[in-house]
Structure formats: C-alpha cells, structure tokens
Image: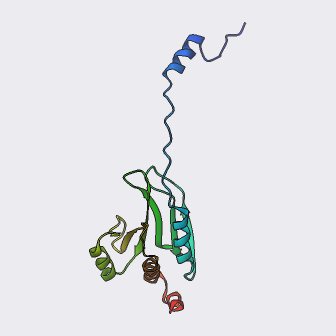
Amino acid sequence: MRPRNDGGSAAARQVSRARAPAPVPVPVPVEVPQDVVERVRTLCLALPEVTVRVDGSLTRTRSTAHSFDIRRRSFCLLVAREGPAGQAVPLLVLRADPGDREALLAMGRPFFAPRAGRDRVGVLLTGDTDWEEIRELVTESYRVLAPKKLTALLD
C-alpha cells in the first residue's frame, strides 16, 4: 500500500485555509482623460519626425506615461498623478530654455518645477487650460531638442 500524498490531513488543510489572508483589493490607477491625450497627441504629432512611446508601467499614483520624442529624446511627457480626492490630475513636462523656464516658474500655478531636469517645466492641465499657450510651449520644447534642419521646417 502506497502512502497518500494529498497535501496533508483534512484538519491541516482546513487550518491553512483559515490562515490565508483576505485578498487585497487592487487600487484602480489614475489615467489621463482620453480627450487630453488626444489634444496633446495632435499638437505633438503635427511637428516633424515626432514619435510616441507609451509606458504602461502603472503605479498607484501615476498613470500611463505618453512620451513624445524627437530622435529618441523626449520633448513632451504627458502623465496624470492622483489628486487629493483620488481624481486624475493630468500634467505635461516640457523642455524650456533657462530664461523661459525661470519666467514660467515665477508665474506659479499652473507651472511647476518637476523633479527631473533643470531644463524642464511642468504644467498642470485643468479645465481652464489655455490650449493655444500649450501649443506654443510644446513647439518651443520641440525647438530645444530638434536639429536645426527640423526646426527650420517650422518657420
């Protein structure tokens, strides 16, 4: 007669089930509203040779990241952070020359200094965002990184 290898006695299985932790609910990550993604995408892809990278490695407090690149270098990053009430707060991180960056940061909200890079400025996108100003900022950010041959196409 062979010994049973069924994972232990019924009593042991019942005890191990009783000790199993309750499933932890998975928090729903924030996401950039689709209309904002489309607006920024349209602005960026209107510029020469722009490509898009999407980083879907979500965290509890950060959305999918949409990076708009010129020759594999990001000039515009669109993400959303979780706001105080758990809502998505979309923001752009753009390149800026030192003088423009300083002037924008001095204006305060909606501009802020992001953690990455001394040549970058962040912009909170709210319901009253001036999309013409965003278009200008995106274009200037592109000019910071793009080769002269490509920026000449903008003039």
**Number of residue marks:** 0
Identify which residue, 66 or 148, lies in the foreground.
66
Residue that lies at the very extreme toward the right in this rendered image: 1
Percent across and percent down for residue 26 are: 50, 41
Residue at the image point whose x is 29% and y is 75% from the top: 107
Percent across and percent down for residue 97 are: 35, 81
Residue that lies at the very extreme toward the front in this rendered image: 128
Residue at the image point whose x is 53% and y is 87% from the top: 150
Residue at the image point whose x is 48% and y is 44% from the top: 27
Residue that lies at the very extreme toward the top in this rendered image: 1
Is residue 36 rendered to the left or right of residue 101? right
- Specify the quadrant that holds the N terminus: top right
When asked about the image quadrant of residue 101, the answer is: bottom left
Query: Does residue 71 appear anywhere in the picture?
Result: no
When the figure is inspected, residue 135 is found, relative to residue 79, above or below; the finding is below
Query: Does residue 79 appear anywhere in the picture?
Result: yes
When asked about the image quadrant of residue 51, the answer is: bottom right
Percent across and percent down for residue 119 are: 36, 75
Residue at the image point whose x is 59% and y is 14% from the top: 8
Is residue 27 rendered to the left or right of residue 1? left
Q: How is the image coloured?
A: rainbow
